[in-house]
Image (cartoon, rainbow, N blue to C red):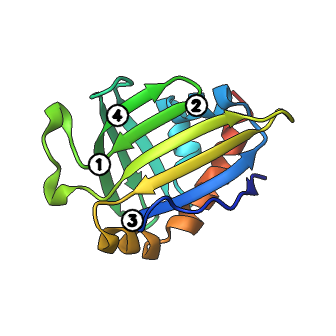
């Protein structure tokens, strides 16, 4: 299971989740960028997710829909901002296709890094910035740490099979 690492937020609108993971940067990046893996790790079970569009390039569209056990459906449109294979993935929900701002201005911009460690593990850091303190607090109250923590454990398990 992924080992928590304490990394402080860089500013008052950021949430951070960091883990030492028993998977390589290549495996973790592949899990993040392979649509077929999303149902197995992206949401804490019994929720599931489908990545229906994944244009892996700066400005490329990301469409992920989360499905709840009671019929809930939460579409998550966004754009990729940076892609550095096996090292860094940056995306936001502030914009949709053709850089059209999303309704409400979005919730977050995520910066994921995958840092190989001498012991063969990977330091995985998810820095999630928000446009306002209120949106950051809302994301935290929605269960950011628990939800992203469970999803990260599931990510590690899936990545190890890739």
Q: Is residue 62 above or below residue 142?
A: above
Give me the C-alpha separation between circle 3 and circle 2: 25 Å
Q: Residue furthest right?
A: 119
Mark 2 crowd level (few <14, some 14–19, many ≥20, 10 Å Cα): many
Residue for badge 2? 29
Instruction: Verify CB contact (< 8 Å) between mark 1 and mark 3.
Output: no
The one nearer the camera, 43 or 1, is: 1
- Secondary structure beneath dot 3 equals loop
- In the rendering, which numbered label is found on residue 13? 3
Mark 3 crowd level (few <14, some 14–19, many ≥20, 10 Å Cα): some
Between discs 1 and 2, the one toward the N terminus: 2
In the rendered image, residue 62, in percent from the top left (x then y), is placed at 33, 36
Mark 4 crowd level (few <14, some 14–19, many ≥20, 10 Å Cα): many
In the rendered image, residue 47, in percent from the top left (x then y), is placed at 50, 59
In the rendered image, residue 123, in percent from the top left (x then y), is placed at 70, 43
Single out the mark in the foreground, 4 or 3.
3
Residue for badge 4? 80
The residue depicted at 28 percent of the width and 60 percent of the height is 131
In the rendered image, residue 110, in percent from the top left (x then y), is placed at 42, 48
The residue depicted at 15 percent of the width and 46 percent of the height is 101
Is 51 positioned to the left or the right of 60 in the image? Answer: right
- In the rendering, which numbered label is found on residue 93? 1
């Amino acid at each position: 299971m992924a080992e928590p690492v304490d990394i402080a937020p860089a500013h008052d609108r950021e949430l951070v989740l960091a883990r030492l993971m028993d998977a390589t940067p290549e495996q973790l990046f592949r899990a993040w960028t392979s649509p077929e893996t999303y149902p197995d790790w992206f949401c804490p079970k019994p929720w599931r997710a489908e990545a229906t569009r994944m244009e892996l390039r700066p400005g490329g569209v990301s469409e992920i829909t989360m499905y709840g056990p009671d019929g809930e459906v939460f579409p998550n449109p966004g754009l990729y901002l940076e892609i550095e294979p096996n090292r860094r993935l940056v995306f936001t929900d502030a914009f949709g296709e053709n850089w059209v701002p999303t309704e409400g201005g979005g919730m977050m911009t995520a910066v994921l890094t995958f840092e190989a460690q001498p012991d063969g593990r990977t330091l995985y850091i998810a820095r999630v910035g928000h446009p306002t303190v209120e949106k950051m607090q809302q994301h935290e109250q929605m269960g950011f740490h628990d939800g992203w923590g469970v999803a990260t454990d599931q990510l590690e398990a899936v990545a190890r099979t890739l």
